[in-house]
Amino acid sequence: MKKYILIFSLLIAFTSNLLAQKGERLEAMKIGFITERLNLTAEEAKVFWPVYNKFTEELKKLRQSTKGKITEEMADMPNMTDAEAEKVLADMVNFKINEAELLKKYAAEFKKVLPVKKVVLLFKAENDFKRELLKQLANRKKD
């Protein structure tokens, strides 16, 4: 039994390591993509990336806390009462409002370290990066 637990533990550790490496590689691709699209100077990059990292961290925390809660609330959708559905809907709307407020807050922060045109390009570059990833995923599924 101990042998199986050890093997299982090693498998989990190996899988976690692979996922971490994949996440790091994806993050490096995103950084390169955004840096290139924004045509950041060395000085701009030095002040931009700490602000951007704070933004993405706050956004990640918001998504993790809210979406997990909403997913959990929706687990038994067919048996949900109207009152429970109303609460889930309110949570969904509040999530979008909080996400928009965070975007507004950081748009102002980004304008302190970048020209406004580059701030607009940033949000376009993020969308383009997501679109490119989805396109690559779709192409992998075809092969």
Image: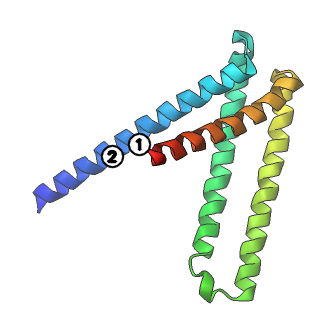
Amino acid type at mark 1: Leu
Could you classify mark 1 by the number of other residues whose Cα lies within 10 Å: few (under 14), some (14-19), or many (20 or more)? few
Against 115, is 125 above or below?
A: below
User: Residues under labels 1 and 2: Cα distance?
Assistant: 6 Å
Query: Percent x, y for residue 16?
Result: 36, 45
Residue positioned 83% across, 49% down in the render? 101
Verify CB contact (< 8 Å) between mark 1 and mark 2: yes
Could you classify mark 2 by the number of other residues whose Cα lies within 10 Å: few (under 14), some (14-19), or many (20 or more)? few
| Residue with the most extreme top position | 42
Query: Percent x, y for residue 66?
Result: 66, 61
Q: Quadrant of residue 96?
A: bottom right
| Residue on which disc 1 sits | 19
Residue positioned 67% across, 26% down in the render? 34
Q: Is residue 129 left or right of residue 90?
A: left
Residue positioned 71% across, 74% down in the render? 88
Q: Looking at the rendered structure, which numbered label has been put on residue 15?
A: 2
Against 45, is 95 above or below?
A: below
Tell me the quadrant of the picture where the N terminus can be found: bottom left
Query: Percent x, y for residue 118?
Result: 82, 24
Q: Is residue 118 left or right of residue 9?
A: right
Amino acid type at mark 2: Thr
Q: Secondary structure at mark 2?
A: helix
